Image: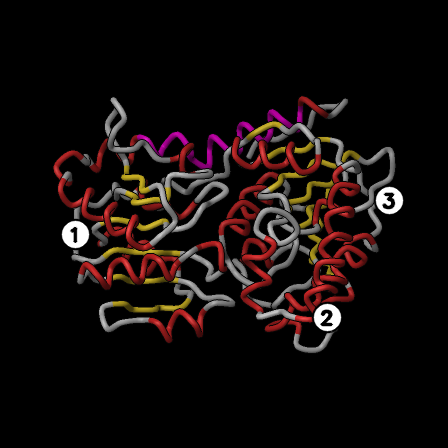
Amino acid sequence: MRKIAVVHDWLNGMRGGEKVLESVLQLFPSADLYCLFHVPESVSTEIESHRIYHSFIQYLPGVKSFYRYYLPLFPAAIERFNFKEYDLVISLSHCVAKGIITPPETHHVSYIFTPMRYAWDMAWEYFENEKISGVNRVLTSLFLNYLRMWDITSMQRIDTPVSISGFVAKRLKKYTGIDSAVIYPPVDTDYFAISRKDNGYYLIVSAFAPYKMIEHAMEAVSRLGKNLIIVGSGQMEKNLKRMASKNIEFTGWIPRERVLELMQGCTAFLLPGQEDFGIAALEAQSCGKPVIALGKGGALETIIPLESPYSPTGVFFYAPYPDSLAEGIRTFEKNRDKFDPSKIREHALRFSSKRFLTEFKNCLNKVLKDPLLLYA
């Protein structure tokens, strides 16, 4: 019987990556789980039920709130794990999880959420936000140079790289020279059921990271006098709340049942930043809700725009600015009769969890010498 390990960057909340982790663990209910650090009870019971091994990062002061400041230590921490007893290791990586070191006889499949954003194309979007200047700015540049070199080197250790979208695969090729297959992440289309309710608000469900551009959505809806509910939290939270007008409500991270309720009751879902894929936007489409999205990145693979000859599932705006997003909202409201909830959901079903599990199993069986017996 094969011994299998799954590696995730860290476990401190249920976002898109953790939803993918849940699906992968369905295939391997006895797999061991490795991560840099784990905040107990921060993820689902399905994930928490596995034996979880963590690195020395777990014991550093203030790791729960200030883990980002330990980024320089992450490569060394992930390389310290020992996988000699495993036949197959699956890493799910947006940071350093893909950089594990496995023995020659252990097959390493890495599911790449994104090339490390803070090392490559979005480096200064992250670090400018920290108001770095002077000597610290120079040191940050030197560290980012090291991180990029480590990122390229660590990619060479992967036996089978898989990207979550064509957009991610293209960036991965550009920055590291590595070709990868594409398997779209799972969307729980069974849980996110169709609804024709409209309670008069727009919705965002997101981590509060700089590249998400949530402030653009806030400014756009304020100008238009629309209501906006924002679900999530993160490093930008204080700044965003400081900017909020009275028509904007923050909920923090809330139970899944409440997220479903909000998605089923919204007018439309907003996706103001460039996404690598965008699971939440597809959850909204599964509920029959249109998405107003920046027309770049993974959204181009998951949303059918108004100008398409097919039944649309959303509206694209093409400049990453509040004015452009506001115009996207206006365009949507002028064309609301063109959005059919049943057709929107039908589109979302193409990204179901069942489809993901089938494609992921087929990928594993193709690359392993002895196919796995997978029935999940």
Q: Is residue 101 above or below residue 256?
A: above
For label 2, the crowd category at 10 Å Cα-Cα, with few meaning under 14, some 14 to 19 and many 20 or more, is few
Residue 239 coordinates in the image, percent (x, y):
43, 72
Q: Is residue 371 above or below residue 45?
A: above
Identify the image's colour scheme: rainbow, by chain, secondary structure or one colour. Answer: secondary structure
Which residue is pictured at 63% across the width and 39% down the height? 111
Instruction: Give the numbered dot on residue 45.
Output: none
Q: Which residue is mark 1?
A: 198
Q: Which residue is mark 3?
A: 84
Residue 67 visible in the picture: yes
Residue 375 coordinates in the image, percent (x, y):
57, 31
Which residue is pictured at 66% across the width and 28% down the height? 179
Secondary structure under tag 2 reads helix
Could you tell me the amino acid type at mark 2? Val
- Residue 350, magenta (yes or no): yes
For label 3, the crowd category at 10 Å Cα-Cα, with few meaning under 14, some 14 to 19 and many 20 or more, is few
Q: Which residues are magenta?
A: 347-365
Q: Toward the viewer: 133 or 4?
A: 133
